[in-house]
Amino acid sequence: MRLEFDAELWIWEARPDDAWTFVSLPVDASDEIRDLTGGQRRGFGAVRVEVRIGTSIWRTSIFPDAKRGAYVLPVKKAVRKAQKLGAGDTARVAVEVLIG
């Protein structure tokens, strides 16, 4: 499964330094990912993904966030720096779920 969406970068409230910056996946896409991955999730309900923002491509995990009702994606500092992004900015995000 592959999806593209625009999302605003936000900082995790529990760690208010800029090292913990995320985007939220769309709720409907998060529901599809939950259905698709069924019993194949890792610790904390994590799902392995490959991500592209601008020219940056990397592999990481997305995590379910009950408060938002969606998966959230951590955006590494190196990616934010390379793409000139900060909290409050909107980025075009491509996510591919890696199964298996």
Image (cartoon, rainbow, N blue to C red):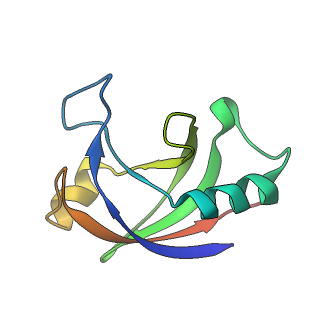
Q: Position of residue 50 (x, y in %)?
A: 54, 64
Q: Position of residue 85 (x, y in %)?
A: 17, 61
Res. 100 in view: no
Q: Measuring 81% from the left and 47% from the top, which residue is drawn there? A: 40
Placement of the C terminus among the 4 image quadrants: bottom right
Placement of the N terminus among the 4 image quadrants: bottom right
Res. 47 in view: yes
Along the line of sight, which residue is nearer the eye, 27 or 38? 27
Q: Measuring 48% from the left and 47% from the top, which residue is drawn there? A: 72
Q: Position of residue 39 (x, y in %)?
A: 86, 44
Residue 29, placed above or below residue 92: above
Q: Measuring 76% from the left and 60% from the top, which residue is drawn there? A: 99
| The quadrant where residue 55 appears | bottom left
Q: Measuring 32% from the left and 33% from the top, which residue is drawn there? A: 12
Label total for image: 0
Q: Can you name the residue that lies furthest to the right here?
A: 39
Residue 43, placed above or below residue 69: above
Q: Horizontally, is 93 left or right of 65 in the view?
A: left
